[in-house]
Image (tube, grey):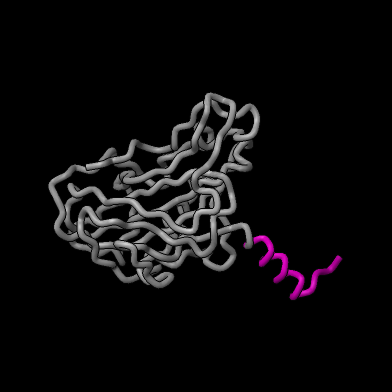
Amino acid sequence: MKLTASTCALLVATQALGHYTFPSLIINGVTLPAWQSVRRTNNWEDRNPVTDVNNINLRCYTSQTNAKASTALVNAGSKIGFALNQSIYHKGVMNVYMAKVPQGTTAADWDGAGNVWFKVHEIGPITNGGSSISFPTDDMLRFEFDLPRALPSGQYLIRAEHIALQEAAQVNGAQFYLGCGQIEIAGGGNGNPGPLVAIPGVYDARDTSIHIDIYWPVPATYRNPGPAVWRG
């Protein structure tokens, strides 16, 4: 059957309905305009997830360093977060990573390559010894958390990812939805963030937190993939 242009457009739009992006930073309760301080991703229209943990798009869903945005000023210890373009449709977990921009460059010009990322926040499921599992990110439209006060001053990339696990029983079935913001920390401390990891590189497709059946048997416990959260 030959599909018309309008039918193809409808199929793409229908597929995108269940998918989501992270277009806006939230700073001390104020939601910034979409794609102002978050790099507009290659999937900003189709919203397709990353499913290959070794794909360069896992970093910021773009391999183009010219996917620039403005860099928002934030004080260390401030409340920060992300707003989504629509509520989270899939059951899964949230991780937030940051990476300090090297001296001599800016957040807008840096691609975040290398062992430079550390985790600052995560939202995992609520488990009950194998009798039930629930996901606090269900239907979430926004989330916020406090930046560590010990975070050193300077420019950073801040990256949110939601890992949808509804098809994770098969290898490469987990779906990664993500966005990278650009911030400059003022009034920072003397902390030493870590452990540092590379993205891609931090995950293995067979990690038991990524390759997992969340329906049966119901997981008795769960640990978000990646390093421990650095709290300063």
Q: Would residue 26 be counted in the magenta stretch? A: no
20 and 194: which is toward the camera: 20
**Residue at image coords 41%, 42%:** 201
Query: Which part of the image, by quadrant, shows the C terminus?
Result: top left
Q: Is residue 199 left or right of residue 84?
A: left
Q: Would residue 15 be counted in the magenta stretch? A: yes
List x then y, in percent, for residue 228. 34, 36
Query: Which part of the image, by quadrant, shows the N terminus?
Result: bottom right
**Residue at image coords 61%, 33%:** 213
List x then y, in percent, for residue 25. 37, 63
List x then y, in percent, for residue 226. 40, 38
Q: Is residue 134 above or below residue 90?
A: above
Q: Is residue 232 left or right of residue 200?
A: left
Numbered circles on residues, count: 0
What type of secondary structure mainly makes up the magenta span? helix
**Residue at image coords 41%, 53%:** 160
Magenta highlight range: 1-16
List x then y, in percent, for residue 142. 44, 58
66 and 28: which is toward the camera: 28
**Residue at image coords 49%, 44%:** 136
Q: Is residue 209 left or right of residue 39?
A: right
Location of residue 182 (image quadrant): bottom left
